[in-house]
Image (tube, grey):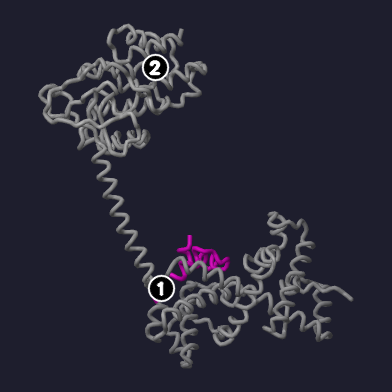
Amino acid sequence: MLTDNRAFYEALGRAETPSIKLLAEKIGYNVRQTALQARLSPEDAEELLNDAVVITIANIRNGKFQFTEFSPVTYAKGVVRKLIANRLRSVKPESEAIGDLHLPSDLDADIYLQDRERQAIVGKLLNQMGESCRVLIHMKYFNQLKDEEIIHQGLTIYTSVGSLKSKRSQCLKKLAEIARQAGINEVF
Amino acid sequence: MKYFDIDAYLDGALTGEALAAFETELRGNPDFAQEVAAFKQLTADIEMQTLREHVTTVLKETNPLGKKPNLWCHIVMVGGVIAGILITYLVYIHARSAVVPPMPPTDNRPLDTLSYITPQITDNQSYTITEKQTNPSLKVTPVIKNAPVQIDPKPAKLPTPVYSSPNITGKKLNLNKNLQMLLDKIWHAQFPPYCVMLDSSRFALVAHQLINRDFTVALESLEMEARNTPQNDTLHFLKGYCLLEMGEGTGALHFFEHLEDRQPNWEMQLEWYRALSVLIEGDAEKTVPKFKKIAFANGHRYQKPSLEILKLLK
């Protein structure tokens, strides 16, 4: 089960609920202690925990966190330290900050926090879209299902990969258009 | 204009000539490059945001930081605990009061030396039970401790059964509509039985369950009780009664056999229950003699319904 590091890592990559709970439990104490030392509020500590879990999973998904013998817990603790350091604006030498932890050296906390605000708005705009668009987008970008899987399992009304891609493309264009109108990012 | 599949490119699904053509276009067409970048940014944002929303939802349920609940949570929790204690207390009180007159704790002691409560059988039926009576025909009669046994085996009239007979569809007896209707009319099996008195300390819970007609649960309680004293006549009687009401005639019969050897006052009730047990099993050959025996016994409490049954069994 999740006692095996690789199984835990893979379950996190799929954002499975038990694995998220387990990771949060494992780093919960660490976050609480670190937040106390840094005199962060309970709300900040909660946000810190959420961010650490999200970053760990995202980095598994995008390949930045490759599986080694280390547990994802170790990686997530490293993320917590980086995020704390960023919050405190106290730039410490990396070796001092991480101790013997396996640190995600690729994490740029500044960029992460900056992106988070934009992503939150994208999330709100996505929620304003129709149900069919939301489902299609969710299947690909959250559940990470392949188009062939979606068609094969009959998860939507679309019966061919072409029609599915076409519909999702329309949805994304519409979302980009709404985002542009909202002025959240010129790049859209 | 040539179509380029940005989605496939970002997924890494383009290969060979398609990939080469895409990259050529990307290098030579700044507008297209911007479009691809925008698409990439948008989908990356969606990925992160949907993931974050999922994580937030999951973590809200778990409270991994051991965050203290707010004041309202405290109030709700304390209220819940108080309500739980109150309910438990009420159920306990209810179960205690639900008990019928006590029964001798052992079956081998002579009846006239026992210190239990005598049932006073009235014209409109027996004694019993709780303030929350589910059977409106049953009345609570004051009980007297240490009184001699005064069981009148010949009540003037049986009350109309309140509950219908058990569902015995599928049994081998060919029940016609009339017989089924009659069975409901003569299903004199309401709890508590007129002759058996229950030990209030032992059978409080079971009595409560039987009054509520929760026969399966009552049977389980009796099984638990049987671990302590497997050879108790009251226990056997109640087990048989549960099975009878559950439509398990054969099982019920097993428990009703031979009890009158030690409990002569139960004889009429046992004969009636045995006859009903056989009847619901659909064994016509065995059923008729049992009802005949009751029907021909002058003054038998269940004479009249037995005669009615016999008419229809002809």
Residue B2 lies in what quarter of the image? Answer: bottom right
Residue A8, given in percent of the width and then of the height, sits at 50, 66
Vertical placement of B1 versus B238: above or below?
below
Which residue does the image show at 49% across and 76% down from the upper left?
Answer: A76
Q: Is residue B233 left or right of residue B183?
A: left
Residue B97 lies in what quarter of the image? Answer: top left
Vertical placement of B309 versus A35: above or below?
above
Callout 1 amino acid: Leu
| Residue at disc 2, secondary structure | helix
Which residue does the image show at 74% across and 77% down from the upper left?
Answer: A177
| Residue at disc 1, secondary structure | loop
Prevailing secondary structure class for the magenta stretch in the rendered image: helix
- Which residue does the numbered mark 2 point to in the structure image? B278
* Inter-mark Cα distance, 2 to 1: 64 Å
Which residue does the image show at 55% across and 77% down from the upper left?
Answer: A55
Q: Residues within 10 Å of mark 1 (few under 14, many from 20)?
A: many
Q: Nearer the viewer, residue B177 or B260?
A: B177
Q: Residues within 10 Å of mark 2 (few under 14, many from 20)?
A: many
- Which residue does the numbered mark 1 point to in the structure image? B65
Chain under numbered label 1: B
Chain under numbered label 2: B
Residue B293, given in percent of the width and then of the height, sits at 33, 8
Vertical placement of A184 versus B66: above or below?
below
Q: Are marks 2 and 1 on the same chain?
A: yes
Span of residues in magenta: A1-29
Callout 2 amino acid: Val
In reply to whether residue B138 is colored magenta, the answer given is no
Q: Nearer the viewer, residue B305 or B241?
A: B305
Mark nearer the N terminus (2 vs 1): 1
Q: Nearer the viewer, residue B259 or B29?
A: B259
